[in-house]
Image (cartoon, rainbow, N blue to C red):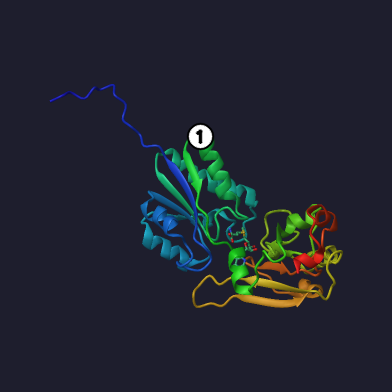
Amino acid sequence: MTPVPTDKKQEVPRGTLVCVGTGLNLAGQISILSKSYIENADVVFSLVPDGFAQHWLETLNEDVRSLQPYYAQGDEVKNRRDTYAQMVQAILDEVRLGKKVVCALYGHPGVFACVSHFAIAQAKDEGYSAKMEPGISAEACLWADVGIDPGNSGHQSFEASQFMFYRHTPDPTTHLLLWQIGIAGEHTLTKFSTSSDRLQILVEQLSEWYPLEHEIVIYEAPNLPVQSPRIDRLPLKNLPFAELTPISTLLIPPSRELAFNTEILAKLGISEADLG
Ligand SMILES: C[S@@+](CC[C@H](N)C(=O)[O-])C[C@H]1O[C@@H](n2cnc3c(N)ncnc32)[C@H](O)[C@@H]1O
């Protein structure tokens, strides 16, 4: 028998990280590839809409750890930056142990979701293999449920508070999506709701481009196959009195017709009539 050299170091497997999206609707909106990553992971961290989705993940892998407890619990006041840092830490701790780690986030894991981006960047910085698999986002569901092809006139997406705090300029000939409308104007990163006063300020801001009577849509994709989407249409001026939840997304359809770019058309030798 060949003796095993005592000074030979044990090969430690390199940890890996894959962030996958589970879609919005229970069990049916995840890609085959993402599901397979979950099934074959050593540990799965999860952030999904409800207990049903969490339970479904637990049928795919026996070590699923919800990231939900890192959010403020009960009356606790906690900055979401701390929450996200702790989530990244928990994920990286397992990668550093040499495990195949999957982070399963609802929707698309990298759309209006920072934890996956932070964790992947940190893992790569430390030399680990880390990547993201796309998922079906709230926006993808919105186009399907509301029946809009965003390619018809284009679209813009902003996080609602960022839209308020910075000088974004919406193009009223396109569709405008404001994500996290339910916490619009909330700057402390400690609360999970907004107020009518803040929404009134947003309405005034938007009135620079949209008439107060302009129809807007509050959209909520179903998280369970038995649910229907929420598609509430209301005039912009009524936004401050609307019922908003953490899963509400605001859609503002175009209020103006597309305008021809006559200079470019002239350079291309195309007339407006050519475009129908
Ligand atoms: C932190 S972001 C997460 C988005 C998620 N990564 C995705 O791909 O859809 C949370 C925001 O996404 C939107 N959102 C989440 N769930 C939704 C749902 N069921 N219907 C519509 N919008 C939703 C809302 O704007 C919500 O405030």
In this image, 56 relative to 213: left or right? left
x and y percentages locating residue 212 in the rendered image: 84, 73
x and y percentages locating residue 199 in the rendered image: 78, 66
How many C-alpha atoms fall within 10 Å of the one at disc 1: few (<14), some, or many (≥20)?
few
Q: Is residue 39 above or below residue 117?
A: below
* Image quadrant in which the N terminus is located: top left
Report the residue at 54% width, 45% height from top.
88
Residue wearing tag 1 = 126
Q: In this orientation, which residue lies closer to the viewer: 51 or 11?
A: 11
x and y percentages locating residue 9 in the rendered image: 32, 26
Report the residue at 70% width, 74% height from top.
243
Q: In this orientation, which residue lies closer to the viewer: 48 or 192?
A: 48
In this image, 130 relative to 190: left or right? left
Callout 1: CB less than 8 Å from ligand 1:
no
Q: Determine the image quadrant of residue 235.
A: bottom right
Mark 1: secondary structure: loop
